[in-house]
Image (tube, grey):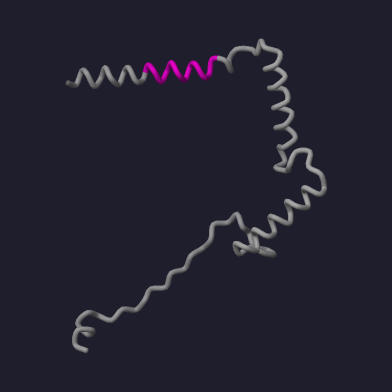
């Protein structure tokens, strides 16, 4: 019984290792296909342009629309001037004073 579960575990690990190698192996090899090479170059170029967190090749009109939408969402969810929307909100729960059970039963 124990040997079958061990064998089953080994088979699963073997399949996982084969799958992981199948995913990583093409990355380790140098790209041979010119189309794939062009795609990777364009992808790297795009990532370098968007590194600042801004939109890539955005017109002033699109940036203005983005700003107004972000302001609208901030107002809708409690944001505003000087409010850090990335900070986790602080909750304050006050303890409610309860009457003891013996006093409540006497009334």
Which residue is at 30% across, 21% downward?
A: 9
Which residue is at 66% across, 10% downward?
A: 32
Relative horizontal placement of residue 10, taking residue 107 as reference (left or right): right
Q: Is residue 85 above or below residue 53?
A: below
Residue extending furthest toward the top: 32
Q: Which residues are magenta?
A: 14-25
Residue 78, given in percent of the width and then of the height, sits at 60, 64
Quarter of the picture containing the N terminus is: top left
Residue 89, given in percent of the width and then of the height, sits at 53, 61
Relative horizontal placement of residue 71, taking residue 29 as reference (left or right): right
Which residue is at 48% across, 16% downward?
A: 21
Residue 41, given in percent of the width and then of the height, sits at 72, 22
Quarter of the picture containing the C terminus is: bottom left
- Majority secondary structure of the magenta segment? helix
16 within the magenta span: yes
Residue 84, given in percent of the width and then of the height, sits at 63, 59
Judge by depth and name the residue closer to the eye, 51 or 75. Answer: 75
Relative horizontal placement of residue 61, taking residue 38 as reference (left or right): right
């Amino acid at each position: 019984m124990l040997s079958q579960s061990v064998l089953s575990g080994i088979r699963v690990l073997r399949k996982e290792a084969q799958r992981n190698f199948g995913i990583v192996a093409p990355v380790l090899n140098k790209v041979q296909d010119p189309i794939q090479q062009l795609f990777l170059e364009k992808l790297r170029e795009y990532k370098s342009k968007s590194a600042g967190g801004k939109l890539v090749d955005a017109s002033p009109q699109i940036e203005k629309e983005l700003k107004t939408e972000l302001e609208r969402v901030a107002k809708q969810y409690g944001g505003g001037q000087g409010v850090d929307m990335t900070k986790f909100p602080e909750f304050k729960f006050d303890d409610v004073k309860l009457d003891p059970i013996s006093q409540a039963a006497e009334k």
